[in-house]
Amino acid sequence: MNTVCQEMDVPLIRFDKDDLLRVQTPHEDPLVISLIVSNCLSKRVLVDPGNNANIINKVAFEQLIVEPKQVKPTGNPLVGFDGKRVEPIRIVELPVYAARRNLKENFVIVDEHLSQPPDGKRTNSSIYSEESDALQKKSIALQASSKEASNIKELVNLCLMTDKDKLKYSIFLCFNDVRLLPKEVLTEILSRLPAKSLLRFRCVSKSWLSLITSPNFIAIHLNQSHTNNSHLLIKYYSLNPKKERFSLRVDDNDKSFFELKCPFKTRNNSFFRMVGICNGLICLSDDHFGYTYTIIIWNPAIRKCVNLPKPRVCFHTYGPYMFALGFGFDSRTNDYKVVRIAYLQHRMGSWDTSAGVESLLFGGGEGYIFPPEVEVFALKTGSWKTIEANVPPYNMVEYFWSSAFVNGTIHWLVYGKWEGSNQNHRGTIIGFDVGGEVFCELNLPKKLADDNPLNLAIAVFGDTLSVFQYDKRVKIEHCSVWVMKQYGVVESWSKQFNVDLHGGALGGALGFRRNGKILLARRNGKVISYDPDNRGSKSLGICGGTDSIYVGTYAESLALLDGVNAASGGAKVDSCDMVDSEEEPVSNGPDKDALEKHSFTHLLFSSVFLRQ
């Protein structure tokens, strides 16, 4: 690339003595740069001051969009570093864009793979070339008149015809000047690309960086992702080896999947509770055993996360308590929020009757104080705030609680004693409006309300609220799926279908697929896809601890890419490194005894229950 360097009228890059630290001299270190060659981004271009020819590998050349007339024969051999003579295949004149200048350079095409592939086998590059041949010809024909609106539209459609990111970007760069593209066309093209490609394209120019990181573009990209690229996320804790895994799968294709790398670990090296998934963000909490305060909002697509600060209500200041979490999106302010409801327990097991017996909930041997403490964390503020909310007077099942975000509201199953009821408990649903930050109540149908709260689990069915109803919590034989078809209307609750769990062979229902099938967990931890129409099942090749498995819909997004306005007081967004769980330090004394008692009984109950 000597000629390119000589023709670029740019300031010289100078090196001083500090750059020679830890460098053994004399040296002849090469320089590797990135250039746009023939409208394609070449990431690794070796600049060798002792080389007199511009060389391009055959595999790289086959991926370029080149007119046949640009390729010419050549008879001059090349001599390699080892003295070996190499006969070039052809010589080609290619446009090179560097330092804001368009240049034309001759490149010698060589084939580093001297041996031919076995008969009947094709290299990836030849397959790629055959797939893209028709698209290459069409894109070349558009280059001469790319300013015309009709050709711009055709080129946009051409970009969207292929799933190959490299080819898509190459076709896109067929314009003589990308700046000729209308902003709405540029936005339309970029919004269809995966997050991984967009992260690279931020480096193209300042205008592209500003566009890709803008809240408006992030919202447009998310909408495209929800429409075209929604996947099924299955989280589980594998027992051999002991590791938490996140399996991302095409919802209607069990053979197409890959694993998201989880950069976090819990306090006891087990698994996180999945609080929820919303717009490509995953909320995790390390709260299964004991008092910990590690809550993480994670975007695996862009490898960014937010570690929430310690909430106000903790054991050190309030003593024993139980709590539940929820995660959702506030469309009014374009903000993500985590809500934490903490039910304080009477310290040392004594009843505080000064507030009256009515102020105590019956859920727990020692009772919880009502109303609970409610805190809300917002990404845009980066802090917790306490709200004085009118929380309906119900209790949640400790440890086994779950939440569902539907219609801008986070929902939990709760239970309480009702006046005039013969039942020891009666179930219902409470909701937290993420935008208005107020609580509401949604009644269950009588068959669900009168059931044991341990036999119910809340879920999301498409865009509607759903409840799984088991005949019993352990050794399950039967499961019914209820759906609220019209949000907020009690009469719209309907039993969608029944699931035969084959005499307790299965551990419970996990979630739904777009094709109507249900994902179930066997008691041995294997995940299967169950068809309620023909009662057939198919294994997904996943096996983990039954309590660790979570199923949800995941759509890739750029959320957290804009930094959430950290400079103006928002949450700090970090790159995903290993994050350890934070445990509450406890000093010696009565508080320590109460914590040990609470943690031990909690762990014992959960362990025995899960092994039944």
Image: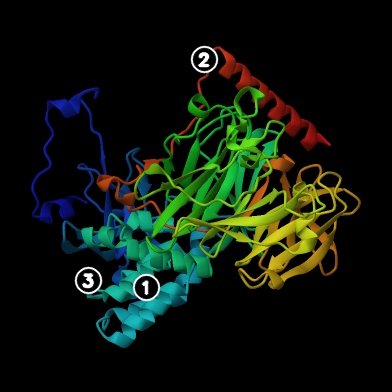
Tell me which numbered mark, 2 or 1, is placed earlier along the sequence.
1
Q: Nearer the viewer, residue 183 or 264?
A: 264
Badge 2: few (under 14), some or many (20 or more) residues near its Cα, within 10 Å? few
Q: Are marks 3 and 1 in contact (CB under 8 Å)?
A: no
Name the quarter where the C terminus is drawn: top right
Give the label, 2 or 3, closer to the camera. 2
**CA distance separating discs 2 and 1:** 58 Å
Q: Is residue 63 visible?
A: no
Query: Quick one: 93 or 226, which is closer to the camera?
Result: 226
Q: Which mark is residue 188?
A: 1
Amino acid residing under circle 3: Arg
Question: Which image quadrant for residue 333?
Answer: bottom left
| SS of the residue under disc 1 | helix
Q: Nearer the viewer, mark 3 or mark 1?
A: 1
Which residue matches tag 3?
179
| Residue 92 image position (x, y, % from top left) | 29, 65
- The amino acid on which the numbered mark 2 sits, given as a three-letter code, is Ser
Badge nearest the viewer, 2 or 1 = 2
For label 2, the residue is 587
Residue 578 percent coordinates (x, y): 47, 33
The residue positioned 35% from the left and 74% from the top of the image is: 68
Residue sticking out furthest to the right: 503
Protein image colouring: rainbow
Which amino acid, by three-letter code, is at mark 1? Glu
Name the secondary structure under disc 3. Answer: helix
Mark 2 vs 1: CB contact within 8 A:
no
Which residue is at a point 76% across and 62% down the rendered structure image? 481
Mark pair 2, 3: CA separation: 64 Å
